[in-house]
Amino acid sequence: MKLHEYQSKELLAKYGVPVASGDVTSDASEVKAIADKLGGNVVVKAQVLMGGRGKAGGVKLFTSSDEAAAFAKDLIGKKLVSIQNPAGMVVEKVLVTETIDIAEEYYLSVLLDRGLQKNVVMISKEGGMEIEEVAEHNPDAIVKLVVDPSWGLSDFEIRAAVAKANIPKQAAGQMVQMIKKLVKVYEENDADMIEINPCALTPDGKLIAADAKVSIDENALYRHPNYEETSSDAADDPIEAEAVRRGIAYVNLGGEIGIMANGAGLTMQSLDEVNAAGGKPANFLDVGGGAKAERVKSCVELILMDKNVKGLLINIFGGITKVDEVAKGVLEAFSQMDVTIPVVARIEGTNVEEGRRILAGSQIIPAATVQEAAKTICELAYK
Ligand code: GDP
Ligand code: MN
């Protein structure tokens, strides 16, 4: 889960990483006061979870707090579009920081290298621009340092890597210290990525993180309850964000056939069968084990929030989950919504007779197998 820049910088500052002072707000009328307090030379930065904010017009330097405030007023509520995020994201908050005088821009990151199955530190003298560009045109300018999982990093290893990256002497010692702190932040907070780009060297020789992107491993979020609220607005898709709030495993896949199944395996199979029948799945949704009617209803509502959905496939194999609970939940959802799309259900397992009895006479078309269900729903939805 990506953290916003202001959250990332707060976290880094706690570990002693130098960052510019500033404040975040969603209220444009507060920007002038914040900028005045910082002395008027400020950068206004859109807090959206996407790369390339600078090029998208979301980062701007000011020498007057009035101009900074006017820019922020315009920026909040605006949708920013970048190469990394063509769908765009709406700006809800802005970070106002003291402007750093930048003489040189470097790149620093700590991330998980899945191939090596180890964490690595990446260092480059070519900061400021996208690291992918550097990797393509000047790969030798990126120095990679592998973190030994048992021993960690020794100072001499970090010093050698910083030297190999041709970081000038006046910045090298500070960079070694910064890398040690970043690795500590990374490990202690279950991060899977920290990126400082640019890592700025000021004309008077101070190294400061001018931007910060921290991402926390979602599987470890339960250990960091302070970030739980962010996890719902971190989702790019509004239905996925709602799914996080409801605690439902949902992924929007962009097709037309809504899918509600239980268990990741059966859900994947349902997606495959819809594809095989010539349809495009709208979503992945796993109702979860032992779901009660209330949760099933919540799942149906979620799937139908997607206005591209033209048909709904229900594929439930009752184990811990009881089929009659699923049937009740579906009908409850339908009784409160005006569902005009076709719905086909293949249900089997625990309490299936009771489940069939509940669904009999409803608008839901029964199917004996998932193949039949997929074929029927595609025929009805795409006709
Ligand atoms: P990104 O485009 O989303 O990576 O946002 P950044 O925070 O990296 O800002 C984009 C660019 O704005 C940076 O590469 C810098 O060149 C410039 N920038 C950001 N903050 C400052 C600052 O405090 N001082 C100066 N001089 N430039 C800045
Ligand atoms: Mn950046």
Image: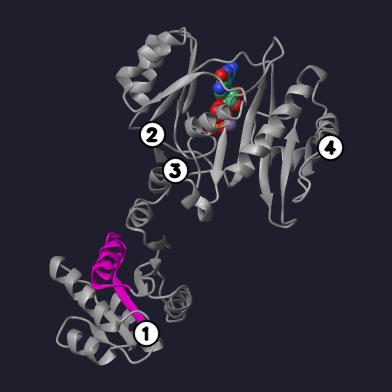
Do callouts 2 and 1 mark residues in contact (Cβ within 8 Å)?
Answer: no
Residue 273 placed where, x, y %? 44, 81
For mark 3, does the 10 Å Cα neighbourhood hold few (<14), some (14 to 19), or many (20 or more) residues? some
Residue linked to disc 4: 157
The residue positioned 37% from the left and 82% from the top of the image is: 374
Identify the residue under disc 1: 375
The spot of residue 90 in percent (x, y) is 37, 37
> Nearest the camera: 340 or 358?
358
Identity of the amino acid at label 1? Lys
The residue under label 2 is 91
Residue at 42% over, 47% down:
231
Where is residue 97 shown, x and y percent of the image? 49, 19
**Type of residue at label 2?**
Val
**Residue 136 drawn above or below residue 212:** below
**Residue at image location 47% in from the left, 44% down from the top:** 86
The quarter in which the C terminus is drawn is bottom left
Crowding around mark 4 (Cα neighbors within 10 Å: few <14, some 14 to 19, many 20+) is some
Name the foreground residue: 373 vs 3. Answer: 3
Say what amino acid the circle numbered 4 marks.
Answer: Glu
The disc, 2 or 3, on the residue closer to the chain's N-terminal end is 2
- Which of discs 4 and 2 lies nearer the camera? The answer is 4
